[in-house]
Image (spheres, grey):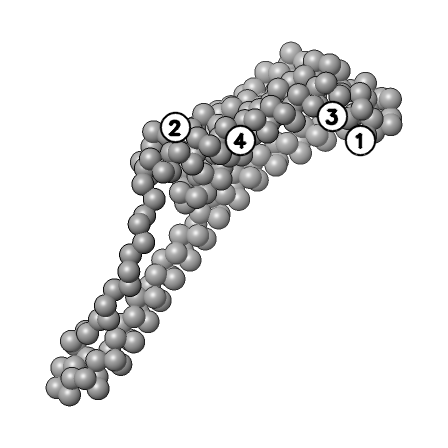
Amino acid sequence: MLQGVFWVIVCYYVVHTLADAGTKGIYTAIHTAIHIAIHTEIHAAIIRNTTHLCTPLDPTPSAPQHTHTLPPPPKHPLPTHSMYHDLAHKTLALGITTGLTIGSFFYLCAPYVIHAFTNDPLTAAALPPRLWGLVCFFQVVNGATFVYDGLLYALQAFAYVRNLMVLGTVCMFVPVLVVLLRVDGTLFAVWGAKGALNVWRCGAAALRVHWGEL
């Protein structure tokens, strides 16, 4: 019974990771199409409005060709690189602190946390201290990874997110999962592969956020 549940979980994580990468790719394509369509429509609306405004003011036949634009609105100062990196450092510190706090709580209160989710002794036995310690440790990595996800979305770097997810799935998640399944055919293999993928995501996102082009 537990063996069947284990393989169901393995299949779920593989499908979930692949679907996540594919979804980000589809989202990138849709976002690009909508972005182009919106800007095209805004440009057309501006041309129409300025044409209607200039027609009563210029009775010459060539009035539609003379675009009398209105004064531009006042410009607000755009965020600078230093402001962005300051925000990135603060949110990253908050994410790591949150992950460390949650991971420490899970580790120190393991019996109570596990009991809050299940009363089945067989299920609890499937979470040995080694596996539970791995899950708690990766909460720190997860905290940093999710912060970087938000920063990449703020930069609208959807194509970059798609590429790092596809590469991470093919080059990190699947190989690590295959190796760990041969060494240790338990949930440790699944969580180890998932943790390796998040380490990849965190590192690749850090390169883009801190050293990439903004």
In which quadrant of the rendered view does residue 135 lie?
top right
Disc 1 vs disc 3: Cβ atoms closer than 8 Å?
A: no
Q: Position of residue 181 (x, y in %)?
A: 65, 17
Residue topped by disc 1: 117
Front one among 61 and 1: 61
Tell me the amino acid under the disc marked 3. Answer: Phe
Counting residues from the start of the chain, the first of labels 2 and 3 encountered is 3
The disc placed on residue 6 is 3
Mark 3 crowd level (few <14, some 14–19, many ≥20, 10 Å Cα):
some
**Residue 50 numbered mark, or none:** none
Helix, strand or loop for disc 1: helix
Question: What residue does disc 4 label?
Answer: 94
Is residue 14 positioned above or below 157 on the image? above
SS for callout 4:
helix
Instruction: Indicate the quadrant containing the C terminus: top left, top right, bottom left or bottom right.
Output: top left
The dot on residue 207 is: 2
- Image quadrant in which you'd find residue 118: top right
Q: Position of residue 11 (x, y in %)?
A: 66, 31
Q: Which badge, 3 or 4, is on the more N-terminal residue?
A: 3
Mark 3–mark 4 CB contact (< 8 Å): no
Q: Residues within 10 Å of mark 2 (few under 14, many from 20)?
A: few
User: Can residue 64 be seen from the camera position used here?
Assistant: yes
Q: Report the Cα–Cα distance between label 1 and label 2.
A: 37 Å
**Mark 2 or 3, which is nearer the eye?**
2
